[in-house]
Image (cartoon, rainbow, N blue to C red):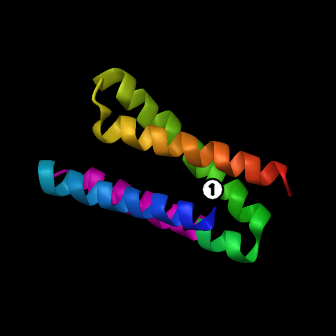
C-alpha cells in the first residue's frame, strides 16, 4: 500500500510540473507539488504510524477526489482532472480497506 501511495504522490507532483510546462500555470505547479509532498508525507507516516498515516492519506485523497472530480465534471476533460480523480478514488478505497483491517 505504501508504495502505491508514494507513486500517487509522484504522479501529483509530476502532474503539477506538466501543468506548469504546458500552460505556464503557476497554480498547477504549486498545488501539484504541495499535494505530492503532503501525500508523500502521509505515505512516510504510514511506515511509523500506520493508522494516522492511512487516515491522512484518506483525507488527502478525498479532498483531491472532490476538487478534481468537480473540475472533471465542469470541463469534461479527462486529463488532468479525470485522471487525478480516478487515482484519488483508488487510493481512497484502498486506504479505507487497509484501515478497516487494522
**Magenta-colored span:** 24-42
Residue 29 placed where, x, y %? 28, 58
Which image quarter holds the N terminus?
Answer: bottom right
Query: At 28% across and 38% down in the image, what residue appears?
Result: 79
| In-image side of 96 versus 25 (left or right) | right
Query: At 61% across and 66% down in the image, what residue appears?
Result: 2
Q: Is residue 96 visible?
A: yes
In the rendered structure, does residue 17 fall within the stretch colored magenta?
Answer: no
Q: Is residue 62 above or below residue 52?
A: above
Residue 5 or 21: which is nearer the viewer?
5
Q: Is residue 22 above or below residue 81?
A: below
Q: Is residue 63 visible?
A: no
Could you say which quadrant of the image residue 3 lies in? bottom right
Per the picture, the main secondary structure of the magenta-coloured stretch is: helix
Question: In the image as oriented, which residue stretches furthest toward the bottom?
Answer: 48
Residue 65 or 30: which is nearer the viewer?
65
Neighbours of disc 1 within 10 Å: few (<14), some (14-19), many (20+): many
Residue 58 placed where, x, y %? 65, 49
Residue 84 placed where, x, y %? 41, 43
| In-image side of 38 versus 70 (left or right) | right
Question: In the image as oriented, which residue stretches furthest toward the right?
Answer: 102
Which image quarter holds the C terminus?
Answer: bottom right
Residue pointed to by mark 1: 57
Q: Is residue 56 above or below residue 84?
A: below
Amino acid at each position: 500500500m505504501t508504495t502505491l501511495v508514494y507513486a500517487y504522490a509522484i504522479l501529483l507532483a509530476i502532474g503539477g510540473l506538466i501543468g506548469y510546462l504546458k500552460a505556464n500555470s503557476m497554480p498547477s505547479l504549486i498545488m501539484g507539488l504541495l499535494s505530492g509532498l503532503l501525500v508523500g508525507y502521509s505515505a512516510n507516516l504510514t511506515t511509523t504510524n500506520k493508522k494516522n498515516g492511512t487516515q491522512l492519506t484518506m483525507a488527502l485523497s478525498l479532498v483531491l477526489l472532490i476538487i478534481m472530480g468537480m473540475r472533471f465534471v465542469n470541463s469534461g476533460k479527462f486529463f488532468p482532472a479525470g485522471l487525478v480523480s480516478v487515482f484519488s478514488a483508488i487510493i481512497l478505497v484502498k486506504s479505507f480497506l487497509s484501515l478497516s483491517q487494522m
